[in-house]
Amino acid sequence: MSRRVLLSIAVLAAASAAPWVVSNPSRQNFLILAMMTAQLAVAWNILGGYAGQVSFGHAAFYGLGAYTSSVLLIQFGLSPWIGILAGGVLAMLFALLIGWPCFKLKGHYFAIATIAVAEIVQVIFTNWRAVGGAVGLYLPLREEGLKAFVFHASKLPYYYIALGLLVLTLLVSQTIERSFLGHYFRAIKDEPEAARSLGVNLTRYKLVAIAASSFLTAAGGTLYAQKELFIDPGSVMATSLSVKIALASILGGVGSLFGPVIGAGILTGIEEVTRQFFGGSGRGTDLILYGMIILAVAVYYPHGVIGGFKAWSQRRAARARSGSTG
Amino acid sequence: MSVEIVLQTLLSGLLIGLVYALVAVGLTMIFGVMDIVNFAHGEFLMFGMYASFWLFSLYKLDPLFTLPLTALLLFALGAAVYQTVVRRIIHASMLSQIFTTFGLMILFRGIAQFLWKPDFRSIDNSLVSGAVRLGALQFGLPQIVAGAGAILATALIWWFLDRTRLGVALEATAADREAAQLMGIPVQRMFTIAWGIAAACAGIAGGLLSTFYPVFPEVGANFILIAFVVVALGGFGSVTGAFLAGIIVGLVEVVGGFLIGPQLKLALVLLLYLLVVLLRPQGLLGRA
């Protein structure tokens, strides 16, 4: 236990120091992106990993978070810090509203229903004049500072806000994993029929999962809006974004606490490197590489990087045991 | 609103719906036979469009006549994809299966961009161009040919599955993999054929579309979501269901687009999907 705490502190310290090691602004931006993706992947994992309800519609929650805080700021001058909570609550209410009927669906049916819901939300926002429609929303330029949730001179403060949000999301995730909820979620995922026959109200616990997941995802959306100071449906509500969040989680290993963080780091890294080295050509070399890496991981490490690492260390332990006895 | 407009709208919806049906037939077949949702299905359609485009612009072969060749090429591609990649994940979890076909999708788009650049291309002056007048109604000939071709191809698939030994073996594999294996059906070969046929269906749809739809590396994205909706609406695995659902989706899209605006038509189709699966989770004709 104490070893774990020490390790956590060490990782946190390293993460806090990271932007000082890389001073290049574009590299720093990459770190912020990786942090933000990691937070989204951990939030996704609560519903998709622990409770096993694969969603490809999380961009709807993300976009609702981004739009709520931005509209409140533009229309009423409300602080984004209030907006981040309002966006989270709104996304959560929306998630409960659509989750309640959609959780009747299983497997692929549920996954595609989530795409459908998110696409509908995107179409509505694209055609909704009052919130900027297809043009999007520009956030007003204001004096920078933590209280205003906006920074111009350096983007570095966003890194620490993203890190804070990631730590918060990890804490929520860990609390859920270790509480009775974690057991219920695993039962819903692995043995839904058995859980039902034992009197577990499946829909109720799936709703708990989607509530936590959507709130945290929406918070990530507000952070994005504050960092970019511009949002439109294509950037905060696209299905490609939903898929990317899910991919990061799957790549790292679903249903584990840190798997999504590792997956997000790798995914963002691959994207960045392939774009830097091959993207300029505009000839799709970056896509080819990206696709091949995803394929290789999916085929050879079906349980993600964490799963592959566990299998490897188990094999090593077994070899060590057999070596010592014979 | 005059009778002509109603008829014009309904028939236009029917025509595009038939193409949607053909795209979805392949997708639903793969799902029915091996429980895999193929995210790269739209890319099979894209390759079909490019095959048609290049055969036309390099060899002056009309898309109408190159359809069999396109189908053959795509069959080979589908079978190869199964043998090299999908075969390895057939027992994996739903998540890694989705992940795999998603990787294929990105890879295929990248390959298309690499080989043919991200430009929009179109086939001009093919044999099927111009319009057909029916009294006060007017339809594009390419759309009519596409609709008719889609009916023919779907009928062929239906005949194959229902009336040939190979097709029945395929259906048996879909119904119960283990039992089929025990009866001596070579399951692996069935899977390979299913992927080949699925890709060929998408390829034919691509060839039919290429006479009136722009060809570009990401064109598959415009069809994959609709194809998912059609598959789920018809019931995963049901070819007849996909055919019916394709027509319904085409009608809803065109009629809805006409009544409340084209920018909302996708939302309408998706709303219809949600309503149907919530009231009937197995889709129209799916196995419960």
Image (cartoon, coloured by chain):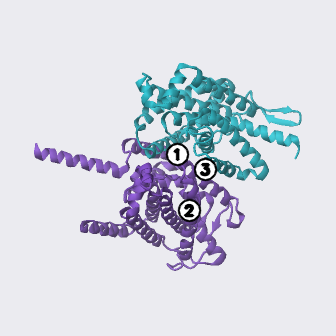
Chain colours: A purple, B cyan
- Image spot of residue A110 (x, y percent): 54, 50
Instruction: Chain letter for mark 2, please.
Output: A
Q: Chain of mark 3?
A: B
The numbered mark at residue B278 is 3
Task: Give the CA distance from mark 3 to mark 1.
Answer: 14 Å
Q: Are marks 3 and 1 on the same chain?
A: no
Q: In the picture, which quadrant includes the N terminus of chain A?
A: bottom left
| Residue type, mark 1 in image | His
As shown in the figure, which amino acid type bears the numbered disc 3? Leu
Image point (57%, 78%), residue name = A79
Task: Point out residue A26 in the picture as x, y percentages from the top left corner.
Answer: 46, 62
Secondary structure type for disc 2: helix
Residue underneath mark 2:
A96
Q: Kindly indicate the quadrant of the structure image that contains residue A80.
A: bottom right
Q: Residue A269, can we see it? A: no
Q: Residues within 10 Å of mark 1 (few under 14, many from 20)?
A: many
Residue B146 in the image, given as x and y percentages of width and height: 71, 32
- Above or below residue B147? Residue A315 is below
Can residue A147 be seen from the camera position used here?
A: yes
Q: Amino acid at mark 2?
A: Leu
On the same chain, marks 1 and 2? The answer is yes
Is disc 1 in contact with disc 2, using a CB cutoff of under 8 Å? no
The residue to which callout 1 is attached is: A108
